Amino acid sequence: MTDPQEVAGPLDVDLTIRLTESPGAPQYTFRLEARGGAPGPGSTLPDPSAALEAVQRFGEDIFFPKPGPPKMCTQQYGGPQVAVVTGWFLKRKVDSKFSRTDGCEIARWRAMAPLLGGVAGSTGAI
């Protein structure tokens, strides 16, 4: 199977985001593509520039976390939203799930909110 980046030309970012606001709710699908640090015409997010900025700033740590000691997370519930991000980031395969089930997950969600269909600091709501 050929890497899709080789077929379409080099993409810095080619991500598909599937967002569900609550169990049984409709699933929304977005795409973020970027070449040379700029969003491409195939991007369908509400604010692809903000999404790309979030990915460039936090993507490495969030998509490819380094092993380490367990994190202490507050046991708070931020909502039923779930987002699955798949695709490519700087020639590395991405397959990440986002939720709002505890303080650590809420922080991940907020950092990547523009990628998840919202604006910075939002819940990712449409």
Image (spheres, helix red, strand yellow):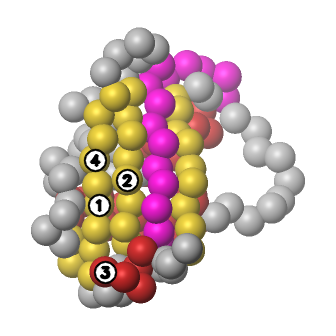
**61 is higher (above) or lower (below) than 3:** above
Magenta residues (range): 74-89
Mark 4 lies on a secondary structure that is strand
Residue pointed to by mark 2? 16
Mark-to-mark CA distance, 1 and 2: 7 Å
Residue pointed to by mark 3? 8
Residue drawn where x is 55% and y is 19% of the image? 77
Question: Which badge, 3 or 2, comes first in the chain's sequence?
Answer: 3
Residue 68 visible in the snapshot: yes
Q: Are marks 1 and 4 in contact (CB under 8 Å)?
A: yes
Q: Are marks 4 and 2 in contact (CB under 8 Å)?
A: yes
The residue nearer to you, when weighing 84 against 73, is 84
The residue nearer to you, when weighing 69 against 62, is 62
Residue drawn where x is 86% and y is 53% of the image? 69
Mark-to-mark CA distance, 4 and 2: 6 Å
Mark 3 lies on a secondary structure that is helix
Mark-to-mark CA distance, 3 and 4: 19 Å
Mark-to-mark CA distance, 1 and 4: 7 Å
Residue 32, label in figure? 1
Q: Position of residue 124 (x, y in %)?
A: 32, 36
Q: Position of residue 57 (x, y in %)?
A: 42, 69
